[in-house]
Structure formats: structure tokens, C-alpha cells
């Protein structure tokens, strides 16, 4: 593959994190990550490259590879593992292994006509977190203090940035612009998801600090993007799945499992299933 095509594939892989098959979107996502953390930037690159290379080596569909379908879960594995664990040579190896695993899981689901969304990233990351927890092989990242009051701009913006573990307002704005580059409809639905997530969390009196850093909005952003192209009941499905995702975000810590983007995936699957039956 020519260098230009390789770069295009990797950038599309980044764009697919929020369901956007657009290289410029992916480039802006990378820029947004770099604005917040150069280490996260490198982790995202390592992930998307590892997942894409694994797909080539396993001889998966070249068309799917070129559209970035084997890059986005892997990129999330990269930034996700760096979010939880401090940098080390072992972490680099785990990012490569986890990215390759996410590629294999996605191919397994894709071949069976399932809708994987970010589930390959979720499962791969849960497995590695469990292994590290059992062995104590890596040091955890220190936690950051939460704000004490609600900041609406922060909540809406970080609803976007937290999709990739970035607690940064400017990063969130760049992520929104990145989606807008590809589709105004997708950008509006994603913004609606962040807004609905914030409103539902406020209505349920969830912690203001968590609301302010976008913890209850980022799954909504993905829900909005997922249903933006739906032909029927798109708005209702986006709002319903977002509201359900907020409840799941709150529930996951109660069972001591990192939520990641599981609330988005599970709530979207539920709404899609119910929508077909109704």
C-alpha cells in the first residue's frame, strides 16, 4: 500500500471512533488528543497502527481495512490503557496485543452480521485490566481531583473529549469540529447526546463534578452519532439510548467494572432490539 493510502487508512480508523468515515475527521481527533496529551497521542497512533497491521496480517477484507474499521477500537485500546496505567515497556506490548485482540473480536462479530461498535475495545481492555489487576504488573495512573460545581460548557465539551479519555474543553471543541467536517447532522445528534446526558444526570442528582467533566455525556455523544443516520425515529432512539446510557454509567462503578463505552454499546443494542420489535 502506498504511503498516502496508509495514512488515509489510519486517519479513517481514528475517525471511525465516532462513526465518521473521514480522514480529516481522524486528523482532527488526533490533534485534539495532542492538545491534551502527547503521550495519549502516541498511544492512539500505536493502537490504530497495531490494529490495522493485525488486520493486514490476518488477511481481513481490504475494503474494510481501508475504511478504518480495524483501527478505531484499537486506537481506543491505546488511549484507554494509558489512561489507567503508567507508561512502561510492558504497557506498550499490552497496547499492541490488546489492539490486535480487538481486531480479531471485531472481525468475529462483523462476520456474523453483528453491530460491534466499540465492543471489541471494551472486551479487550477489560481483559487486560483484569490480568494486570491479578498480577500487579503495572502501576496505576493517579486520579485527578473533581470540580466542586457544575460548568455547563465543560460538561458539553468534555462529553466529546471523554470519548477518548481526554478531560479537556478545547479537545472537546476540536472533536465536535471534527464530526462537523464530515456531517452536520452527525454533529448535531452528537451534541444532543452530550446535552441529554448532562440533563438526565442533573435530573437524577448525580455528582456535579462528574457531570462537569463529561462522564455522563460521552456515551450520549456516541449514541447520537450512531442514530444520526437512522431513517425512522432517529431522534427518539438517540434520546432513549442516551438516557439509558447515563443510568449504566452510574451503575458500572457499583460493580467495580470500568464503564468505558459499554453504556453506549449496551444501550444502543437494547434500543435497536426494542425498536425492531415495536
Image (cartoon, helix red, strand yellow):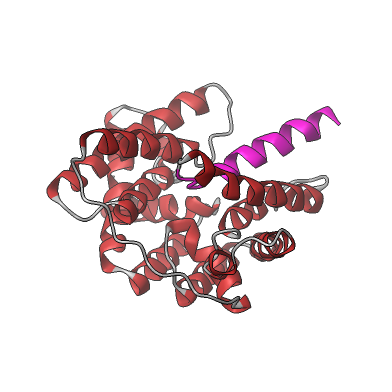
Q: In which quarter of the image is residue 61?
A: top left
Which percent across, then down, holds residue 181?
A: 56, 68
The magenta segment is 258-278
Residue 275 falls inside the magenta stretch = yes
Residue 87's place in the image compared with 123, above or below, is below
Residue 36 falls inside the magenta stretch = no
Residue found at the very far top of the displayed protein: 112
Tell me which residue sits at (35%, 62%) in the image.
Answer: 143
Tell me which residue sits at (81%, 50%) in the image.
Answer: 236
Quarter of the figure with the C terminus:
top right
Nearer to me, 87 or 120 = 87
Nearer to me, 227 or 210 = 210
- Can residue 198 be seen in this snapshot? yes
Nearer to me, 183 or 75 = 75
Which percent across, then down, holds residue 9?
A: 38, 50
Residue 91's place in the image compared with 155, above or below, is above
Residue 149's place in the image compared with 81, above or below, is below
* Residue 13 in the figure: left or right of residue 109: left
Number of marks in picture: 0
Quarter of the figure with the N terminus:
top left
Which percent across, then down, holds residue 122?
A: 45, 39
Tell me which residue sits at (79%, 46%) in the image.
Answer: 231
Amino acid at each position: 500500500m502506498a504511503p498516502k493510502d496508509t495514512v488515509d487508512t489510519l486517519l479513517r480508523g481514528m475517525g471511525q471512533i465516532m462513526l465518521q468515515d473521514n480522514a480529516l475527521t481522524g486528523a482532527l481527533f488526533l490533534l485534539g488528543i495532542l492538545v491534551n496529551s502527547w503521550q495519549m497521542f502516541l498511544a492512539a497512533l500505536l493502537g490504530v497502527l497495531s490494529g490495522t497491521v493485525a488486520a493486514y496480517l490476518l488477511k481481513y477484507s481490504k475494503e474494510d481495512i481501508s475504511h478504518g474499521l480495524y483501527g478505531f477500537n484499537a486506537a481506543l485500546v491505546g488511549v484507554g490503557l494509558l489512561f489507567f496505567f503508567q507508561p512502561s515497556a510492558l504497557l506498550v506490548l499490552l497496547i499492541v496485543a490488546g489492539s490486535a485482540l480487538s481486531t480479531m473480536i471485531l472481525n468475529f462479530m462483523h462476520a456474523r452480521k453483528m453491530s460491534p461498535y466499540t465492543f471489541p475495545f471494551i472486551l479487550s481492555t477489560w481483559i487486560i485490566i483484569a490480568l494486570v489487576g491479578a498480577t500487579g504488573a503495572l502501576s496505576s495512573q493517579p486520579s485527578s481531583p473533581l470540580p466542586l460545581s457544575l460548568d455547563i460548557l465543560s460538561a458539553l465539551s468534555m462529553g466529546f473529549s471523554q470519548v477518548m479519555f481526554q478531560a479537556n474543553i478545547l479537545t472537546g471543541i476540536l472533536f465536535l469540529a471534527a464530526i462537523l467536517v464530515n456531517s452536520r447532522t452527525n454533529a448535531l445528534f452528537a451534541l444532543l447526546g452530550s446535552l441529554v446526558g448532562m440533563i438526565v444526570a442533573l435530573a437524577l442528582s448525580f455528582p456535579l463534578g462528574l457531570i462537569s467533566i463529561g462522564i455522563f455525556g460521552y456515551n450520549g455523544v456516541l449514541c447520537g452519532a450512531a442514530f444520526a443516520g437512522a431513517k425512522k425515529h432517529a431522534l427518539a432512539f438517540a434520546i432513549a439510548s442516551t438516557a439509558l446510557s447515563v443510568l449504566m454509567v452510574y451503575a458500572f462503578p457499583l460493580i467495580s467494572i470500568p464503564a468505558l463505552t459499554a453504556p453506549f454499546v449496551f444501550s444502543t443494542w437494547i434500543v435497536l432490539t426494542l425498536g425492531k420489535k415495536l
